[in-house]
Every structure is written in C-alpha cells, then in structure tokens.
Image (spheres, rainbow, N blue to C red):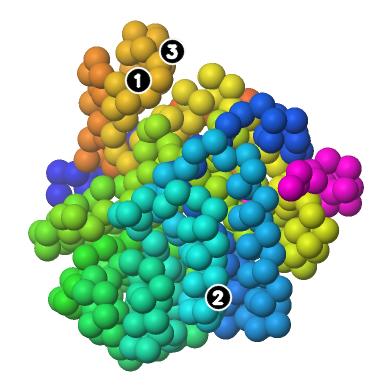
Amino acid sequence: MKLFNEMINHELFPFRESEYIRWYPKSLREPNFELLFNGYSLNPSGIYIHIPFCDKICNFCPYNKRLTNQTLIYSYVEALLKEIKNYTFMIENSDIKFIYFGGGTPSSLKPSDIEKILININDNFKVNADVEVTLESHPSHLTIDFLKEVKKIGVTRISTGIQAFDDTLLKSLGSQHTSEQAFKAIENTSKVFGSVAIDLLFNCPTQNLNNWEKQLETATKLPDVDHLSCYSLILPSNEVQPSKFEEAEMTLLMDEYLSEKGFTHYASCASGGFDYSKDGYQCVYEKSHWSAPQAEFLGLGAGAMGFVGNTATVNGLNINKYIKILNDGYMPLVSTSYTNEEELLRRHFVLGVKTLKVDFNKINFSNNYIHEFFRKEFETLNDWGFINVDRSSLILTDLGRMYVDSVSAMFFSKKEREVAHPEEPEIREIERKVYNNYKGSIKATL
Ligand code: SF4
C-alpha cells in the first residue's frame, strides 16, 4: 500500500508512460560501409534472428510480420543463411552465448529450417557450450512432436505468447488461440523442456483487477512456469483501456503477487514490460543485450536490430526486398549508427537501467567521470526517489522499478530526446532511400 501511494502521488504520475525505449541511440543513419565493415572488429556474443511470419495478425501487435506463407519462408531462410555468411568475414572473434529467434512467430518455421539456421551458425561462429537458444512460439504450434524435434536440434528454451487464460479476453485481443490451447502448450512444454517461459498482457480493454489477479494465479499454479514477462498493453488509442490509476493498481498487484510466489523482478526490457523469473531462470538474452555493458550481438532478418562494433544496426522491414538484396550479394542494412564515447556512456545507462542496476566498474568509464557526467541526472532521480547511487553503482528503488522508462529516458542526450523511437514509419522512410540505391553502398565483400 505504501508503494502504491508513493507511485500514484508522485509528481510524475500523470506522465508515467512507457517511453517505448527499445533502442539507443534512436537516430537512424544511412549505412556507412567504411565504418561498419572496415573500421571495427566485430566480437559478437549473441545473435538475434527475426522471423516475421504469423498464422494470423493480432490487432495489438507492433512487430514486423506478415501472414505465414511456406514458399516465402523457404526463400527467407535461404536469405538468412546468406546474411549469416556475409557477417563471417568481418568477425574478429565470437563466443555466442545466446541465439534468440524472435518474431513474428518463429515456431512457424519447420524444425528442419531452424536446424539449417543453427547448423549454419555453428559452422561460422564459435558457439559457447552453454549457449541459450530461445524459440518464441505460438501456443498452437507447441505439440509434443514439434517440441521434441526442436529440442533435439539445439533449442534450449521455449517462450510462448499466452497473453491470457481467458477466452473472452483472448478474443477481444484478436489472438488466434484459445485458453485450452494455452494450457496444452504449457503442459507439453513442461513435459519436454521441464521449464516454460510465458508472456501475459495486462491493462487490456475490459480487464479489471480481479481478472488480472486470476491470470496471475493461474500462471503461477502451473508446473514449470518459471519465467513470466508481463506487458502493459499499449494501444494507439487508449480510450478503451483501464484508467491510469487502474493500470497502476494492476502493476502493483502483479509485483506483490509474483514476489510472494517466489518470482523476482529482474528486468524491464521491453517498454511497459516486467520480466520475472524464479531463481536460475533469468533469460540470458534479456540480461545481456540490455545490461551495462551491452553484449555485442548480430541482428539478422527483416527488421532486426543489432549492436556490433559499437554500431547499432537496423535491417529494412520489407521481406521481399530483404530476400532480393541478399540474393544480389548485398547487406539488407538500412541504418548503422556508430556510437561515439558520449553516446556509448548514455547507452549504458538508457538500456542498462532496464536490468535495474548499473555497475560502474563493469563499464569502460571511470567512476569519477560517470558521477561528473551524470551529476544532474543522478540528483534529480535521487530526489524523485527512483535510485540509490553510490560510488560504483546505481540501483533502482522499488518506486524506480515502477518508473523504469522514466529513469531510462533521463539519460538521453538532448538531441536524442527529440528523435522519435525508430518504429515502422521511421524505418520505412530510411528504407525507401537506402533500398532504392542499395547497389551503391552496402555490398557484402565475400
Ligand atoms: S502472433 Fe505475436 S507477433 Fe504475430 S501478430 Fe500476433 S502478437 Fe504479433
């Protein structure tokens, strides 16, 4: 109750939004072939692969996707293999600790396609013996046979978008699975993997506090659900959603309930998201590509974002063009933003606070410099009750965890604050320019 009162009475409460920060720096910059490929050595420790296919399009979804089409999937996978190959010539060293198939719906691939991709990665990179290989999956795909096959070829973790255990709610969200399929998917994953990561949505139209509590109760009673990512639904127009006050109640209820059930809030990676896990089940991918320092990782596939050689990379969204450009021997990059020293330090904090702590001794800047550089930001966040900062670390308070996107936004440079987060319209705009002239600048040099 104390935390709830602090949260709703805070001067920032009227502005408590999800900032939609998934990326920093946010500016898109046309690819600089010289800088990306010749100036820096790349040492990735992870790979993100975007699979932009879904059996049905859900109306709340902001990700790059289109309807599943097996002929197109075949060409897409072939193009992905070329993209993997293109990167190999510029890698100095690699120690791949995570491979993350995100989407879209990666489980729309056949296990044989996933296997092709994994074999290709193993042939071209040094893959760590303990690599985490996550497959985001639709509940309706999680049959025992499918799960056994993907486990056999190297997938170690299944993350599935359950969203809710309530058919009325699922229907209102436009989800194409039922609660029965959700239960079956979890049961099957538990049998084959012994561990299940699920996503739930709250702040949904027509949802109230009781309904949200029921979803949490159901999730935590199921065996082997040891990782829960809960997202506050963000709709373009929030008129039909619960009020700000109700959303705050749902957030606090979730935090208290899950903590009582043995889950720890360890990160808030996606905007409006809260990642909870039982001991030993934190997601390597979530932790490494946000925490400070961020892991270097390749972003492969249409619309994927990566960070290698101090450069934030963005691939174009258009799937047919992605395939064509790779077939023509070019790279599908539409933006490569090199991060200078200042932007890198800011990036460590903008993204690092999403894992609720920044350890200054782990990043390549002296403690004195960090304190001097962020003096005002630390003072303000401290006054707001969001952080505890000492000589060598910044840790979010419980109140700060509830305002994590505001904490993150505090570390933007003035210039980046004014830039829109690269969402579809911004990426489409730069994509048009770059892809119209792709033969001029981004040829792979294999
Ligand atoms: S299945 Fe997932 S990725 Fe596909 S449209 Fe629905 S929410 Fe988006």
| Label 3 near ligand 1 (CB < 8 Å) | no
Q: Amino acid at mark 3?
A: Phe
Measured from the top left, where is residue 185 in percent x and y? 33, 84
| Residue 404 visible somewhere in the drawing | no
State which mark lies toward you, 2 or 3.
Answer: 2
In the image, residue 71 sits, relative to residue 77, either above or below, namely: below
Farthest-out residue, front: 123
Whether 47 is drawn above or below 376: the answer is below
What is the secondary structure assignment of the residue under circle 1? helix
Whichever of labels 1 and 2 marks the residue nearer the N terminus, that label is 2
What residue type is disc 2 on? Asp
Q: Main secondary structure of the magenta part?
A: helix
Q: Nearer the viewer, mark 1 or mark 3?
A: 3
> What residue did someone put label 3 on?
373
The residues tagged by marks 1 and 3 sit, at their Cα atoms, a distance apart of: 10 Å
Q: Residue at x 38, y 68 (%)?
A: 154
Task: Return the x and y of residue 69 as percentages of the image width and height.
Answer: 67, 82
- Distance of label 1 from label 2 (alpha carbons): 48 Å
Q: Is residue 14 left or right of residue 61?
A: left
Badge 3 marks a residue whose secondary structure is: helix
Q: Residue at x 33, y 67 (%)?
A: 157
